[in-house]
Amino acid sequence: MEFKTTTTSRPKHIDNSNVSALMRQVLYALVPGTLMLLWFFGWGVLTNILLAVGFALLAEGMMLKLRNRPIIPFLSDYSAVVTGWLLGLALPSGSPWWLILLAIIFAIIIAKQLYGGLGYNPFNPAMIGYAVVLISFPVEMTRWTSPIDMGLLHSSLSDVLARVFGFAADTSWDGITMATPLDHIKTNLMRNISVGQSMEDQQFGIFAGRGWEWISLAYLLGGVWMIYKKIITWHIPVALLGSLAVISTIFWMISSEHYASPVFHLLSGATMLGAFFIATDPISASTTPMGKLIYAAGIAFSVYVIRVWGGYPDGIAFSVIIMNMAVPLIDYYTQPKILGEKG
């Protein structure tokens, strides 16, 4: 979340009292998307969030204790809660507890606290945690349950808890898990099945994946509300979505059978969540007006490359991390000139 700041230096020092209020607003903005995700993918979304937030607070408190820092003031800024919540939304519904714990360890302990805590981390913590488990456990990270409205068999809360805590065999979920729409199209293209033919599958809705298009619109609603409330500025979301739309439109016009439409890309995967809630992280994102536009456009370009030609169906996490590395350079060369300054 790209809270407004007046400095572009690293580390970015944050007023904890202000951060607490802003982070709560971010959580409020996540509610529509969270409810839609819960509606379409069931109890596993709730277990993800509860475990991720709980582990995040535990890891943050433990590291603060080891660093001899006050625990309550830092835990009450809600930054760990937001990181855990975002990871809970990003991970497949009903992920096993140990997968969530590993993601949180890398997000909170490695990517945040070992760098000095909030204000010092160069990378988005949630995306570091997500990327590590995605690379390390590709099987578990592709086990998304099918949308509830597809009419397939779905698990009760007790079944989900049994899966999460290891009391049920992984094979018991094979009948209700499936590839994501992005992964489905990429796999079909490798089999010479066109985008149009792929979209005829029952897991697709009007414009994108069944359920996913409505989840994306809910994230969009929350993101627009944050801009309206001046929690974030428009630069990163508009530049990211606009750039992705332009790139995908060009290739779609070249061949609509080999490249998905821009609407599909905007409403699929983590596009909306990334544009409003991840790329706008106040610490790891660019801070200058021009820098934000360049930073977001770079993310959009990388996302499209990974989705179309890369080895992963979505690319938000990797794209954000790549552009996080470029932020110091971007900010350095996009500093607004002071009135009267020569050159």
Image (cartoon, rainbow, N blue to C red):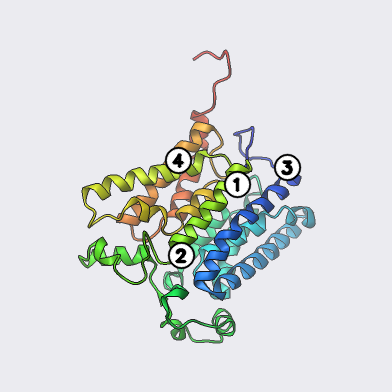
First in residue order: circle 2 vs circle 3? 3
Count of number-bearing discs:
4
Residue named by callout 3: 15
**Which residue does the numbered mark 1 point to in the structure image?**
226
Identify the mark nearer the N-term, 1 or 2: 2
Question: Disc 1 marks which amino acid?
Answer: Met
Q: Which amino acid, mark 2?
A: Leu
The answer to whether residue 312 is above or below residue 6 is below
Q: Measuring from the top left, give residue 51's x and y in whole percent.
A: 63, 70
Q: Is residue 257 left or right of residue 9?
A: left
Q: Nearer the viewer, residue 31 or 64?
A: 31
Give the image location of residue 179, x and y in percent. 38, 70
Per the image, the residue denoted by label 4 is 239
Q: Residues within 10 Å of mark 2 (few under 14, many from 20)?
A: some
For mark 2, what is the residue?
Answer: 134
Q: CA distance from mark 1 to mark 2?
A: 29 Å
Mark nearest the camera among 2 and 4 is 4
Kind of residue at disc 4:
Ala
Query: From mark 1 to mark 3, how far is it between C-alphas?
Result: 19 Å
Q: Residues within 10 Å of mark 1 (few under 14, many from 20)?
A: many
Nearest-to-viewer mark from 1 and 2: 1
